Image: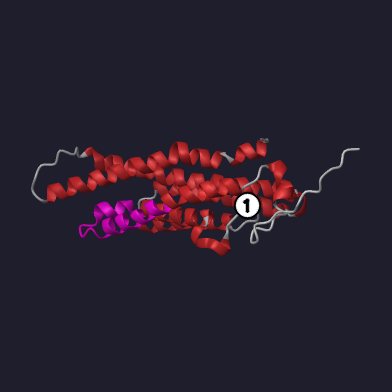
Amino acid sequence: MELADFLGLVHPAIAVVFVFPMIGIVSNFAWQTRQRRLQTLEGGKSKIPPIVGTEHRRIGEWLTGSIVGLVLIGLAYPIGKNIIKKQLWNQNLSQVVFIMIIFALTIGSLVFLYQAKQKLWRGIFATLTGAGLVILGCQDGVFRRTDEWYVSHYYIGLLAAMLMIFSLAIVQDIYQDRSNRWRLIHTVLNCVALILFIGQGFTGTRDLLEIPLSWQESYIYQCNYQNKTCPTAVPQIPK
C-alpha cells in the first residue's frame, strides 16, 4: 500500500473511530432528553438527570463540526489527488487557488456559525458553509455516482451534512420557541439524518471495495462496469 492509498483511509477511519460512536452518544442523549421531558409533562418526577439535555446539545454541536470536517477530508483527498495527478498548478493555477480559498471559507464559515447569535447571521454562515461543501463537491476527481444518486455515498453524505448544519443553525431557536415547532423540526430532520448515516455505513463500505489500489488503477479502470467485464491479460510465454 502506497502513501496515496493510506491517505485514502483517513476519511473512513475517522468516521468509524470517532464520528459514528459520537452519533450513537448523541442519539442516546436525545432519547433520554425526550423521555425526561415527557415524564415531566405528565407531572411525575423523572429519574433521568436534567444534565442529559445540556450534554445532548454540547455533543451534538461537536458532532456537526466533526461531520463537516469529515466531509471536507473526504473531498480533499480526491480533489488533491486529481490536482497532483494532472499537475493542475501548471495548467490552471487560478483553479487551484480557488479551491484552496473555498476550503478556507467553508471552515471559516463553520467557525463563525458557532459564534453567531443573531438569526440572520446564523442563516448566512450556515448557507455559506453548505454552499462551500457543494462547490467543493463539484470539483474534478470527486466520485459522485450521479447516475445512481439514491445510493451515492457522496449525495447521501452531503445531504446528511446539510441537515446537521441546519440543526446547528436553529439550536438557539429551539430553546426560545414556546410552541415547540423548531423542536419538532429538529427531531424530524435528525431522525432522517440518522437514517442517512446508517446508509453511509453501507455505501462507504461498498465504495472501499470498489476503489482499487494505486498500482491497480491502470488495469481496473479498463474494466466495463456495466457489463462487469475486464480485459483478459495476455499470458507471457517464457523464453
Quarter of the image where the C terminus is located = top right
Neighbor class of circle 1 (other Cα within 10 Å; few <14, some 14-19, many 20+) is some
Could you tell me the amino acid type at mark 1? Ile
Q: Residue at x 70, y 47 (%)?
A: 217
Left or right relative to 81: residue 10: left
Left or right relative to 230: residue 64: left
Left or right relative to 133: residue 40: left
Q: How far from the left and from the top, in percent, is residue 82?
A: 68, 50
- Range shown magenta: 169-197
Q: How far from the left and from the top, in percent, is residue 21?
A: 39, 39
Q: Considering depth in this image, is 69 or 27 the residue closer to the camera? A: 27
Q: Residue at x 46, y 46 (%)?
A: 67
Q: Considering depth in this image, is 52 or 225 the residue closer to the camera? A: 225
Q: How far from the left and from the top, in percent, is residue 29?
A: 28, 42
Q: Residue at x 77, y 50 (%)?
A: 90
Q: What colouring does the structure picture have?
A: secondary structure
Q: Considering depth in this image, is 180 or 177 the residue closer to the camera? A: 180
Most common SS among magenta residues: helix
Task: Give the residue number, with chain letter if any, for mark 1.
Answer: 99
Q: Residue at x 28, y 54 (%)?
A: 174
